[in-house]
Structure formats: structure tokens, C-alpha cells
């Protein structure tokens, strides 16, 4: 494969967004084909204190609090796969500041993050980007579909290298913000589980919930125990994923029990408006064009082995959020 021609930051700033996305997809392909090592893993462990300090300042400027209501995991010398629920704009920052050690983050559809301040901080922390193939992709060009599938594979290869070299990973296996007010956690992608199996990494389930106050955004974090999956095979990933999802739901339910209480009199009598308020509280901080439509198109949806309850829930949820918001506006 021919040598990749890198562009500096200012050259990237001048590129159109579609060109920038294409540029990074080509670079990730080149990086994988050349089997380039992932550098800076040990350095990022050493400067984790700096990341926490930056995130502390960010909390002040964004008027946000983060409280850990439970932490059962241990910081041993094994690589760890932190699998976290996805509930809003500041999940990444809240998780990274709470787990107590460096973890490389996976981010789909980074867009302008390649060249903005958030992206700079993520690079400092350690990040692997990729462009996501949306669930409804029938109308896409076949060449683009294959390109996006390869892009997802490059990130899987890169993160496997990081775990194999002793690094940690922070992943949000629901793939998109979770907008369901009843089910604590959506379906989760087993791909991170497979990486953990291949690299003999511990799995640490993490739950995050947010509540918007009059002046502050309050985030609560609940961290579960290390799951040692030594001896598991890749074929076991789906079963382990179900177990991990259950643990994530249990952790989030405990947050609901402690912090999700309110008086019935304070709720809107019309559940449609109450539901719309719930959705708006999550979408309030959205940026970079992240919409409800994109959430619906990128959230993880297993294609096989669906239970009747899962099929029914999907049919009930399909388009419902968008309809409610339109009705209540």
C-alpha cells in the first residue's frame, strides 16, 4: 500500500467535513494495513491526573456535577473493558473522571471533533474514531457501505492492540443515547465483549444517569465489580453480553432508587408532555448535529435471536419519540 500523505491541523481545518471524514477513514485503513503499533499507552496512564484536572475544570464551566454513588471495581494490573450506559452529552467526561485510570475511548461519527477542542482533549486521553454504518443503509452506495464496514473493523483491530498492550478501553455498547424512560439499558453490541475475550481483559460494567436541575446538570455514576472472563471463547460473547447488560441495568436501577424519586404532584398530568420533558432533558445539550433521528439510526439493534418482548418494544418505540415531540411542541 502506498505511503499515506498526512495533513497538518491547519490543512485539515480547510477541508470540507465530508473530505475530513474520508481523510481519516483512509488513514485508519492505512494504519491497519501497515500494522502500525498504537503509541502512547504508557504515557497516557502517567498523565491521567491531567485529564482528570481538565475534566474538573470542564465541570465548573459547564455547571455540571458528578457523584459516584457506588464503586465495586478494583484497579489491578489487568487490562479492563469499561462498558458504560449512554444517557447524554456528558457521559464520556463523567465516566473518564470516575473510573480512576486511563481508558481509550471509542467514538463513532466524530465529525468536527477531529478539529475542535473536545477532539484535542480526547486525543490527549486516547481515542479511536470511526464512521458508523447506520441501521437504515439500504439506499447507500455499495462502495460506501463496504468502506464503512471496513472502517469499523479498523477500530476493532486498533482497540484489540491497545488492550493487548495493557491499555484499557471505555466503550458505550448501546452505540447511541438511550431515550427509553422504562428500560434502564438498551441492547448492547457484543463486539467489545469479543475484544475482552481475545485479550483476556476484565469487564467492568458502569451505569450513568443524569438529572437536570434548575441551575446544575447532575450526573450519577455507579461502577460494578470486575468480571473475570478467563477461559471464555469468542462464541460465548452473546451470552456474556446478556449478563453484562443485566449488571448494567442493576447498577442503573440503584441510581433510580436513590436519585430518581419525585412526588407525583410534580409530574405533568399529561404523560405525553412528561415524556417530552424527559426527552428534552437529554437532548438539551446535544451538539454537532446529533439528533433523535441519528440516535434511532445508530443505536445497536441485533438482527437475530430477538425475543418476542424485544420485537414488541421496538415496534412500540419506532418513531414514537419523534411523534411525541412534534405533538407537544
Image: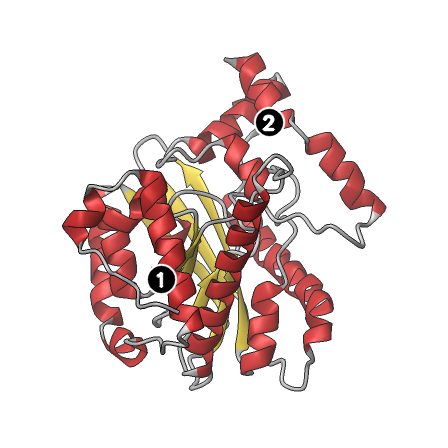
Residue that carries the numbered disc 2 in the rendered image: 321
Few, some or many residues within 10 Å of mark 1 (<14, 14–19, 20+): some
Residue that badge 1 annotates: 127
What is the count of numbered marks? Answer: 2
Q: Residue at x 43, y 70 (%)?
A: 32
Picture coordinates of residue 306, whole percent (x, y):
79, 50
Q: Residue at x 39, y 62 (%)?
A: 28
- Distance CA(mark 2)–CA(mark 1): 31 Å
Q: Is residue 285 left or right of residue 260?
A: left
Q: Secondary structure at mark 2?
A: helix
In this rendering, would 203 be left or right of 113?
right
Res. 203 visible in picture: yes
Q: Position of residue 73 (x, y in %)?
A: 49, 74
Q: Which residue sits at x=57%, y=58%?
A: 251
Q: Is residue 266 above or below residue 93?
A: above
User: Is residue 206 in view?
Assistant: no
104 relative to 117, above or below: below
Residues under numbered marks 2 and 1 in contact, where contact means CB atoms less than 8 Å apart = no
Q: Nearer the viewer, residue 123 or 183?
A: 123
Decide: is 126 above or below 66.
Answer: below
Q: Name above or below for residue 174 compared with residue 6.
A: above
Amino acid at each position: 500500500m502506498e505511503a499515506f500523505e498526512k495533513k497538518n491541523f491547519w490543512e485539515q481545518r480547510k477541508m470540507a467535513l465530508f473530505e475530513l471524514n474520508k481523510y481519516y477513514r483512509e488513514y485508519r485503513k492505512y494504519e491497519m494495513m501497515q500494522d502500525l503499533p498504537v503509541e502512547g499507552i504508557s504515557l497516557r496512564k502517567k498523565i491521567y491526573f491531567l485529564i482528570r484536572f481538565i475534566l474538573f475544570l470542564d465541570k465548573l464551566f459547564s455547571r455540571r456535577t458528578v457523584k459516584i454513588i457506588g464503586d465495586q471495581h478494583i484497579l489491578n494490573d489487568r487490562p479492563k473493558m469499561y462498558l458504560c450506559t449512554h444517557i447524554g452529552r456528558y457521559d464520556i467526561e463523567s465516566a473518564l473522571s470516575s473510573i480512576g485510570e486511563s481508558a481509550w475511548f471509542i467514538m463513532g461519527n466524530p465529525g468536527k471533533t477531529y478539529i475542535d477542542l473536545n477532539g484535542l482533549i480526547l486525543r490527549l486521553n486516547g481515542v479511536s474514531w470511526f464512521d458508523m454504518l447506520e441501521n437504515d443503509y439500504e439506499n447507500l452506495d455499495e462502495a460506501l457501505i463496504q468502506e464503512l464496514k471496513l472502517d469499523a473493523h479498523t477500530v476493532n483491530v486498533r482497540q484489540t492492540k491497545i488492550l493487548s498492550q495493557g491499555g484499557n478501553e471505555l466503550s458505550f455498547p448501546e452505540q447511541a443515547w438511550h431515550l427509553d424512560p422504562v428500560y434502564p439499558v438498551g441492547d448492547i453490541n457484543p463486539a467489545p465483549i469479543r475484544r475482552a475475550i481475545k485479550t483476556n481483559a476484565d469487564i467492568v460494567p458502569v451505569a450513568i444517569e443524569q438529572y437536570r436541575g434548575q441551575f446544575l446538570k447532575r450526573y450519577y455514576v455507579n461502577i460494578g465489580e470486575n468480571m473475570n472472563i478467563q477461559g471464555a471463547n469468542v462464541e460465548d460473547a452473546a451470552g456474556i453480553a446478556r449478563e453484562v447488560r443485566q449488571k448494567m441495568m442493576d447498577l442503573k436501577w440503584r441510581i433510580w432508587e436513590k436519585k430518581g424519586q419525585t412526588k407525583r404532584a410534580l409530574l405533568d398530568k399529561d404523560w405525553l408532555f412528561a415524556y417530552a420533558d424527559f426527552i428534552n432533558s437529554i437532548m438539551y445539550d446535544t451538539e454537532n448535529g446529533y439528533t433523535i433521528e441519528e440516535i434511532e439510526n445508530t443505536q445497536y439493534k441485533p438482527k437475530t435471536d430477538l425475543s418476542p418482548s424485544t420485537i414488541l418494544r421496538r415496534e412500540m418505540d419506532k418513531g414514537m419519540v419523534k411523534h411525541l415531540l412534534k405533538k407537544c411542541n
